[in-house]
Amino acid sequence: MGLFDRLRGDDKPRVAFFGIDGVPYSFLEDNFDEFEHLGALADEGSSGAIDSIVPPESSACWPALTTGVNPGQTGVYGFQDREVGSYDTYVPMGRDVQATRLWDRVQDAGRDATVMNVPVTFPPQRNVQRMVSGFLSPGVDKAAYPDEMREYLQSTDYRIDANAKLGHDEDKSEFIENAHETLDARYEAFKHYLQEDDWDLFFGVFMTTDRVNHFLYKHYEEDMEYKEEFLDFYRKVDRYLGEIRKNLPDDVTMMVASDHGFTSLDYEVHFNQWLADEGWLSYEDDDHDELGDISEDTEAYSLIPGRFYINLEGREPRGSVPESEYEAKRDQLKEALENLEGPDGRKVCDRVVEKEEAFHGDHDDIAPDLVAIPNYGFDLKAGFKGHDDVFGHGPRNGMHSFDNASLFVDDPEATVRDVDLFDITPTILDLMEMEYDAAEFDGQSLV
């Protein structure tokens, strides 16, 4: 037994899951000599590169990972979603997730879950043993339940997220310091609640990895100024995961996973500008800055990341494309996206996915008609103002990828092959020896 000794007499197996948001498996594997604890977890358990979902964006990925179903069932497609029958948009929060979360299944079975810092979980659920919400939460005072948890986290230096704005500075030293402080506080909070040892499922996410990757990943890949600082940050991530693993009790299986991969960024692609240039999109006036400003002449528009919507008659308020022309228009747009080249002559899109291929469920009425999956180096933006050029550069030098996400399972019997995010929830349920209907999930257990 380790430091985190079991307080209750329940002998059912347990799982401790740790998210490392946006960490690519190939990066970890290439540096297992540096990241010895993750290397040991790979050697003694099972690991490999896995796929994300369509689209590979954290706000859509974490609901899918924690339910085992696609956005057509979760109802969350990205950082910004569109209201049904409207051009109004909103930022999805925890209550917008329509599918059953993993920890709800655990609690409904009479077992307990501690959930920490998972994106798209605000406000914290009160039917869970304890929860502090993650990405997009306004602050610990409103994001933690019960009071004991809120009071403890407020008494420490716990932060919901690193300060990404610091990453916009050319001098990254303050950003790197902030990232380390956020990581340290997250680890200390995880350790504190792991030691409580009154949980059956512990589910915590290190979000700061994604933040560091957005601003430093190219430094690693191209031997730039902050490469060593980037590696040093991940040495600490590895050390913290190693300490956690060493102290987990024998009845707990540890899992580590990311929600998408990462790669260097060369060009931002401002797709609403491209649609306007190509005659697909127009606005009612010159002072446009949101989706509601598009005109009746518009045939298509885009939301991040790489989501495209036909302005369909009867579905959109000012829909201009008749239902009879929908398939032809979508095919035309798809072909144009597939043929689009960047300034360096490379194809922007690796592939363009039709909605029927990626989404199904009770909430597919706001599904994008097409989703573009970019080739490495292109970050697919939207926006309705401020970009006269299709291709540009921003403060970030790293971007999400659909492939090359990471999965580690501290069980040599797990099979990590042809895996995506949908497989994680049924795998955890199997490891916990919980009953479930396999037909409910888009994935399947790896054990």
Image: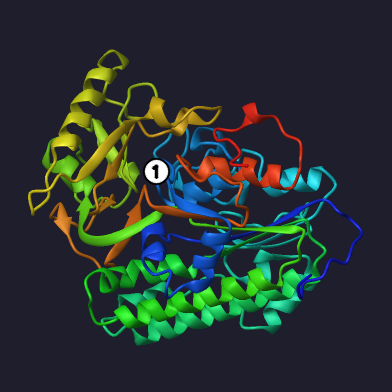
Classify mark 1: residues with Cα within 10 Å, few (<14), some (14-19) or many (20+): many
When the figure is inspected, residue 372 is found, relative to residue 79, above or below; the finding is above
Is residue 314 in sight in this rendering? yes
Which residue is more in the foreground, 58 or 16? 16
Q: Position of residue 417 (x, y in %)?
A: 47, 42
Query: What residue does disc 1 label?
Result: 55
Q: How is the image coloured?
A: rainbow
- Residue lying at the far right of the rendered structure: 9
When the figure is inspected, residue 309 is found, relative to residue 176, above or below; the finding is above
Question: Is label 1 in a helix, a strand or a loop?
Answer: loop
Identified at 59% across, 43% down, the residue is 97
Q: Is residue 159 left or right of residue 400?
A: right
Which residue is more in the foreground, 54 or 133? 54
The picture quadrant where one finds residue 16 is bottom right
Q: Position of residue 39 (x, y in %)?
A: 49, 66
Identified at 18% across, 35% down, the residue is 338
Q: Is residue 312 left or right of residue 107?
A: left
